[in-house]
Image (cartoon, helix red, strand yellow):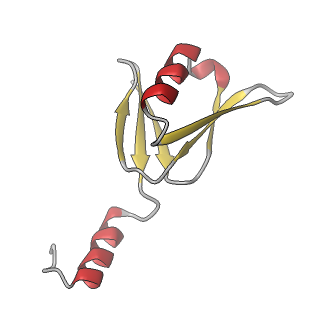
Amino acid sequence: MTIIKLTEYQPDKIPRYQISESVIDELQQKYSNQVTVNLEYSKTGDYWQLTSQGWVGYIPLTNELSIQLQPKVPLNNLFGMLDYAYNLRSFD
């Protein structure tokens, strides 16, 4: 299984041949709020530019391809920020 890992708001280039048009169509129809998709043309080969739109999670597209949406900040830092901001009991 191939897992494409996207970090929020950081575009990633995937060669066009690695993702079929039908999978891209499904991604755009079902997950357009979570991931933007642009087709970029290049002399060295066309590619899909995928950008996570601030969501965190997992998108199973086919039995062989999934997208993992990761936060920009490591999770342990995120929990530390939440602890500090909201005076939560420590997760330790």
- Is residue 20 positioned above or below 41 on the image? above
The quarter of the displayed image where residue 3 is located: top left
Residue 4 image offset from top left, x and y in percent: 48, 36
Q: Is residue 15 positioned above or below 83 on the image?
A: above
Q: Is residue 22 above or below residue 31?
A: above
| Identity of the residue drawn at 35% across and 17% down | 63
Q: Quadrant of residue 81?
A: bottom left
Image x and y of residue 82, in percent: 28, 75
Left-right relation of 86 to 34: left
Q: Residue at x 13, y 80 (%)?
A: 89
Label tally:
0
Q: Residue at x 42, y 57 (%)?
A: 71
Q: Viewer-proximal residue, 91 or 33?
A: 33
Side (left or right) of 11 relative to 65: right
Where is the C terminus found, in terms of image quarters? bottom left
Q: Quadrant of the N terminus?
A: top left
Tell me residue 13's x, y (percent): 64, 38
Q: Quadrant of residue 84?
A: bottom left
Seen at 39% across and 19% down, the residue is 62
Outermost residue to the right: 43
Image location of residue 24, percent across then percent down: 54, 23
